[in-house]
Image (spheres, rainbow, N blue to C red):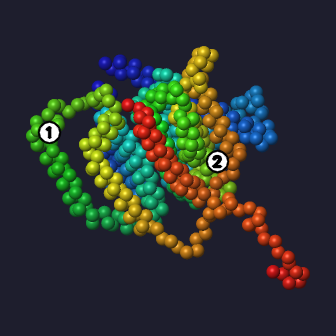
């Protein structure tokens, strides 16, 4: 009896490690890729010293940051101050529990997978808001307030985009969402929603052009101004891990997850996990490309875009999609 | 089975303890954080009951939106901690009354004849596994049997929303707003005005 529990526990831990370790390694390479792509955009070389083509640069940086002194400001609320980066990190990894990488390759294939992802991504704001409050300093506090307002606003339109996809699928299970795209990826019939989701994902992960919570030209470094060493690393890892998580969510909702673009001979022998990875890398490249191209939004413009453009438009699309599905009797059973 | 009971006791004890901390923590921000912990544990209990949709809705609505706004407001309050302590005993009788009423209600629920209600079979310890997902089941019952109640809920929410907007909407004069459409339609003919300036006179 107890032996069985031990075995089950070990299997669960092995599954978790099998997901979390590749995610953390891909975070390191994402940071390297971002610096390299930005360098190419700006006609620079980027990191090229550590390892061949500078490929080990992120590991060197991580080592440097971890070995530095961890400074906790004397005026801070210490427990919350330490808890904030941990929460950010944990939440950015927790979402991976339901991501299907290939048919059956999922830690927990729950019925409400997409709701779980939505819940986890909406909790991400707590790490930031706690960090801003606990630092007891002006710039982090302003960053935290901005982030709270921003993430709550964009969640609403993300919710409507998810509802539109769910109307076409008829299930909240992520594997079923992928399988519903066998005829056509949802990015084609729901193209406007795909664009809205991508832009909202940028805002939800606090990436440029919506990185106002950490806007370095006005807020020093925003909510993590007071953080150093290992706690800074946790924020950094958390931000990039949630970036990859949002990209995976985009791929599952709109780009057919592990499915090949066409179900023909040379394409459908490639393993699903490879298609999944390629698509996630494509979306991540878009994230970096946007960062290298667009200037930062002003705060009132950001709020206007969220509430006055995306919200009415996505609401209209929910109604239009459901009307279309009902009229042509294409509703999933 | 052992694992199930262990998780149940973990979630329920943390939920009760953090609920206690909500009312006993000195710092109101800590209170809100404990409230969030309590919400998360309650949603864990829902998952154990097999009501995964309710659990996720609890996290999305209460933790992801309502508690964020709570935290937002409480963080910005200028709080005098000493004064806050003074009021504690003043509200104690009322709080105690509410608690007693709740305990009595729960007691009545447990002591009434169980054969008459849905608990006539023993309460299931394991989640009920159905062919139909419980998201679908909620939808099937909510939009058919309880359709009018559902609509009334929507209208109540709408009224509350309109009310809060009217209370906070103040049209102050002198606020500069950006009109993006008019900015985008600007071209050289409307933006620039050519003037012949006479020497020594100005415009």
Question: Could you tell me residue A299's position as x and y percent?
Answer: 60, 58
Mark 1 lies on residue: B117
Q: Quadrant of residue A42?
A: top right
Mark 2 lies on residue: A208
Question: Which residue lies at the image location 39% right of the left edge and 60% below the top edge?
Answer: B161
* Name of the residue lying farthest toward the right: B199
Question: Could you tell me residue A238's position as x and y percent?
Answer: 56, 40
Secondary structure beneath disc 1?
A: loop
**Residue A14 seen in this snapshot:** no
Q: Quadrant of residue B125?
A: top left
Tell which of A244 and A333 is nearer to you. Answer: A333
Please, is residue A321 above or below residue B148 in the view?
above
Question: Could you tell me residue A312's position as x and y percent?
Answer: 50, 52
Question: Which residue lies at the image location 46% right of the left edge and 68% below the top edge?
Answer: B169
CA distance separating discs 2 and 1: 57 Å
The residue carrying pointer 2 sits among few (fewer than 14), some (14 to 19) or many (20 or more) residues within 10 Å by Cα, namely many
Quarter of the figure that contains the N terminus of chain A: top left
Please give left or right for residue B78 compared with residue A305 in the image. Answer: left
Quarter of the figure that contains the C terminus of chain A: top left
Secondary structure beneath disc 2?
A: loop
């Amino acid at each position: 009896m107890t032996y069985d529990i031990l075995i089950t526990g070990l299997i669960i831990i092995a599954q978790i490690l099998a997901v979390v370790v590749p995610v953390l390694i891909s975070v390191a390479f994402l940071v390297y890729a971002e610096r390299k792509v930005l360098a190419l955009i700006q006609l620079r070389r980027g990191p090229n010293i550590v390892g061949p083509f500078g490929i080990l640069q992120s590991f060197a940086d991580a080592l440097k940051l971890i070995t530095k002194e961890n400074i906790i400001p004397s005026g801070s609320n210490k427990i919350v101050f330490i808890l904030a980066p941990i929460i950010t990190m944990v939440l950015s990894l927790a979402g991976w529990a339901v991501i299907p990488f290939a048919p059956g390759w999922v830690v927990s294939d729950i019925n409400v997978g997409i709701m779980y992802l939505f819940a986890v991504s909406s909790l991400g704001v707590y790490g930031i808001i706690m960090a801003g409050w606990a630092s007891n300093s002006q710039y982090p506090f302003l960053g935290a307030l901005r982030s709270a307002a921003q993430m709550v606003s964009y969640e609403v339109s993300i919710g409507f985009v998810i509802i539109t996809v769910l109307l076409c699928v008829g299930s909240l299970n992520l594997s079923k969402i992928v399988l519903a795209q066998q005829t056509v990826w949802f990015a084609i019939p729901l193209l406007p929603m795909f664009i809205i989701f991508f832009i909202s994902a940028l805002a939800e992960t606090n990436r440029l052009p919506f990185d106002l919570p950490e806007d370095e030209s006005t807020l020093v470094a925003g909510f993590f101004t007071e953080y150093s060493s290992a706690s800074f690393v946790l924020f950094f890892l958390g931000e990039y891990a949630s970036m990859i998580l949002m990209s995976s969510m985009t791929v599952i909702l709109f780009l057919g997850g592990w499915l090949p673009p066409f179900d023909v001979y040379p394409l459908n022998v490639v393993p699903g996990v490879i298609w999944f990875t390629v698509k996630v890398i494509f979306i991540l490249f878009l994230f970096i490309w946007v960062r290298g191209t667009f200037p930062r939004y002003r705060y009132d413009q950001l709020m206007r875009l969220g509430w006055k453009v995306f919200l009415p438009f996505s609401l209209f699309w929910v109604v239009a999609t459901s009307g279309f599905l009902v009229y042509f009797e294409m509703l999933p059973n | 089975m052992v694992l199930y009971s262990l998780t149940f006791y973990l979630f329920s004890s943390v939920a009760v303890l953090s609920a206690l901390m909500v009312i006993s923590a000195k710092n109101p921000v800590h209170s809100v954080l404990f409230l969030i912990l309590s919400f998360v544990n309650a949603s864990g209990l829902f998952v154990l009951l097999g009501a995964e949709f309710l659990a996720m809705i609890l996290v999305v609505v209460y933790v992801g939106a309502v508690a964020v706004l709570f935290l937002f407001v409480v963080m910005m309050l200028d709080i005098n901690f000493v004064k806050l302590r003074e009021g504690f005993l003043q509200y104690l009788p009322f709080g105690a009354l509410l608690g007693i009423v709740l305990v009595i209600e729960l007691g009545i629920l447990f002591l009434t004849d169980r054969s008459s209600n849905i608990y006539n079979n023993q309460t299931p310890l394991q989640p009920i596994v159905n062919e139909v997902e419980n998201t679908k089941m909620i939808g099937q019952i909510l939009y058919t049997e309880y359709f009018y109640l559902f609509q009334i809920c929507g209208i109540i929410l709408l009224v509350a929303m309109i009310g809060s907007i009217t209370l906070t909407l103040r049209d102050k004069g002198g606020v500069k707003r950006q009109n993006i459409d008019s900015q985008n339609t600007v071209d050289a003919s409307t933006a620039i005005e050519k003037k012949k300036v006479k020497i020594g006179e100005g415009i």
